[in-house]
Image (spheres, rainbow, N blue to C red):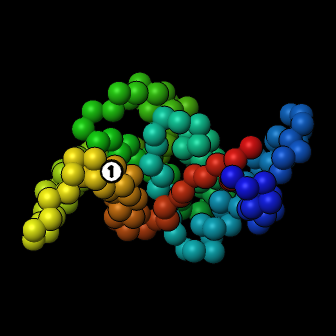
């Protein structure tokens, strides 16, 4: 990524690259938890919903969400965190996702296998006179597989009166 663009994104997101010791790390965790709590309060939402892959980004975001809703409950607010597993058929690294759930300790956990939605959409596309090549079909299916989890998360958020959380790596290191 362009270094200037990276710096602009990091500045806009108030990314602190100055975490140098335990004290500054704790301060950054507190800042992020307060941000999450502020979003919940301002929005009036009662829940946070996040897809958990087992990777660092979703695990970190999930733990911060759980800490935020726990603090909110201690402060007398109704709040919960819903972790969502969103595999396509069988996930090869499911053990990582389960370890992440153990670390996060969400209030609620559910799984939505996105295979039927992805395959159903791909199978329903009919273009008169056009037969996409296998490589184009695979590419298109990859894009659908990447976007379907967000659709499921928004549906779940609607059911629980929540907001969807999107972890981001904040334009790289």
Point out residue 10 in the picture as x, y percentages from the top left corner: 77, 58
Residue 19 visible in the shown view:
yes
Point out residue 136 in the picture as x, y percentages from the top left corner: 28, 53
Position of 41 with respect to 8 (left or right) is left
Closer to the camera in the image, 41 or 117: 117
Q: Which residue does the image show at 59% across and 43% down from the upper left?
A: 57
Q: Which residue does the image show at 78% across and 64% down from the upper left?
A: 8
Residue 44, quarter of picture? bottom right
Say which quadrant the C terminus sits in: top right
Closer to the camera in the image, 128 or 36: 128
Closer to the camera in the image, 57 or 102: 57
Point out residue 94 in the picture as x, y percentages from the top left corner: 38, 29
Residue under pointer 1: 139
Position of 40 with respect to 24 (left or right) is left
Q: Which residue does the image show at 43% across and 68% down from the upper left?
A: 161
- Vertical arrangement, residue 122 with respect to residue 106, above or below: below
Position of 16 with respect to 152 (left or right) is right
Residue 121, quarter of picture? bottom left
Point out residue 172 in the picture as x, y percentages from the top left corner: 70, 47
Closer to the camera in the image, 135 or 91: 135
Q: Which residue does the image show at 56% across and 39% down from the upper left?
A: 59
Position of 99 with respect to 135 (left or right) is right
Residue placed farthest to the top in the image? 95
- Vertical arrangement, residue 21 with respect to residue 119, above or below: above
For mark 1, give the secondary structure. helix
């Amino acid at each position: 990524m362009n270094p200037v663009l990276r710096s602009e994104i990091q500045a806009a997101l108030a990314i602190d690259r100055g975490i140098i010791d335990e004290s500054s790390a704790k301060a950054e965790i507190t800042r992020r938890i307060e941000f999450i709590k502020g979003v919940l309060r301002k929005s009036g939402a009662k829940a946070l919903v996040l897809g958990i892959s087992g990777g660092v980004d979703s695990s970190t975001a999930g733990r911060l969400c759980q800490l935020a809703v726990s603090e909110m409950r201690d402060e007398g607010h109704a709040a919960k965190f819903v972790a969502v597993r969103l595999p396509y058929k069988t996930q090869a690294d499911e053990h990582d996702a389960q370890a992440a759930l153990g670390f996060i300790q969400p209030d609620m956990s559910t799984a939505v296998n996105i295979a039927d939605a992805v395959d159903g959409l791909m199978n329903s596309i009919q273009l008169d006179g056009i037969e996409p090549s296998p490589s184009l079909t695979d590419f298109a299916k990859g894009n659908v597989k990447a976007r379907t989890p967000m659709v499921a998360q928004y549906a779940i958020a609607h059911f629980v009166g929540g907001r969807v959380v999107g972890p981001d790596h904040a334009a790289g290191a």
